[in-house]
Image (spheres, grey):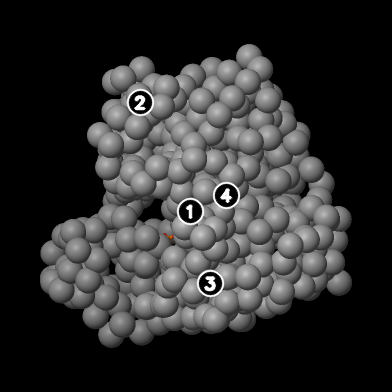
Amino acid sequence: MENQLNILVIGSGGREHALVNKCLESPICKKVIAAPGNGGMAQLIECFPTSVEDIPGIVALAKSQSIDFVIVGPEVPLCLGLVDALADENILAYGPKKDGAELESSKTFCKNFFKKYKIPTAEYQSFTAVEPALDYLKSHPAPIVVKASGLAAGKGVIIAQTNKEAEDAVRSMILDKTFGESGSEIVIEECLVGEEVSIHAIVSGETFLCLSPSQDHKRIGEGDTGLNTGGMGAYAPTSALSKEMQVVIEKTILLPTIHGLIAEGIQYNGTLYAGLMLTESGPKILEYNVRFGDPETQVLLPLVEDDFVQLLYTSARNLPLPAEINLSSDKCMTVVIASDGYPGAYPKGEPINMPEVLPENTQIIHAGTLLDSTDQILSNGGRVLTVTSRGDSIKETAQTIYSVCDSIDYKSKIFRRDIAHREIKRSN
Ligand code: AMP
Ligand code: GLY
């Protein structure tokens, strides 16, 4: 089994750079390539300019490069049926097929699934017309949550603090199509209160393994203020989730999900990323994603002491996962460096200077970057780099990371200085 697999990683973010790093250290990997990749990946491996939405293009690339195993990073190709298309050509891939990916591509499907299998979640109702939705709001006053049912890159959720805000959200999603077809169906749900954490599980049919519980920081501004983003920093494990609570979540949320998928005739092989709210009446699930989180991947993968690629490959072959996963007891944290303006418009093409030497156990992972013909790294996206480090103290790990963030130099650099603030407070 040594050095056997030619692997293709799909995607271009920090998540995929972290996955490539794991492939490069895996004994079962012979060669790894990426599509479309980014500047950091291009410094390590060959990258091909195929878009993540170009399903026939990816299948053709996998065939022409004699790929044995494809690891799919983002949700879009999963929801478009990439894994199904690869299976038709007998190419193994990590990630669910289109039917399983519906847990992420349709919030209505996901919420109906929770209801059917008695999985604790916020009370809700789905709508495709404005009037019944406005009627529902009359008996369910603010604060209330209005969501586009389809994919909206994390932006299709309005937490309405007033009834007017909720009504406006309904009208703008259904009538003005602010989220395009993704908002032609909406979900209105109860606003849950509590601390938010996530659990990522690798699933292979009836078996699953949980990675360390993590906490993301979705807002752009310090103190969790301002617009929602893809995530500005994360850390794991989070002590907000006790071992006992994790057992409750496995029993009341993950296991019923796995049994429900089987009952629906959906063979699920891939990641289940559960976004959870720890409410006064117990943990409730906000949503599932069917891929690894970004930037969560950057903190989860360094803590896995087993051959991570072997675990993904086991899942892709629908074989049982081992009973246990070996996770480091270190704290791992990552801070996202973005370009000023993100999550709105931001400049691109700025040269980035990076430190030559990094502290121990510290990495700069690339997200929106490009390697130009002179081998200069340029900014090329909203989230540009993530700086990741691990150690036995979250406070010291944060200090190490921020010293690296300060030493990275480009014109529009911004980052939050308070990542892991809750954990640092708890550790004092
Ligand atoms: P989602 O895309 O469904 O994860 O929602 C994005 C963010 O909105 C979540 O990470 C939560 O912070 C927040 N959110 C979503 N649903 C609810 C809810 N029912 N109650 C409170 N906050 C929510
Ligand atoms: N960091 C949030 C996500 O990946 O959905």
* Some atom of ligand 2 lies within 8 Å of the CB belonging to the residue at label 3: no
First in sequence, mark 2 or 4: give its number.
4
C-beta proximity under 8 Å, tags 3 and 2: no
Question: Which residue type carries mark 3?
Answer: Pro
Q: Quadrant of the N terminus?
A: top right
- Residue found at x 35% / y 24%: 63
Callouts 4 and 3 close, C-beta under 8 Å: no
Residue denoted by label 2: 64
- Give the answer, above or below, for where 269 lies relative to 216: above
- Residue receiving disc 4: 43
Kindly identify the amino acid type of the residue bearing the numbered disc 1.
Answer: Asn
Q: Is residue 406 left or right of residue 321?
A: right
- Whether residue 62 sits left or right of residue 354 in the image: it is left
Q: Position of residue 272 (x, y in %)?
A: 50, 41
Q: Which mark is residue 38?
A: 1
- Of the two numbered discs 3 and 2 on the same chain, state the one appearing first in sequence: 2
Q: Considering the numbered disc 3 on the image, is that residue within a helix, a strand or a loop?
A: loop
* Whether residue 259 is visible: no
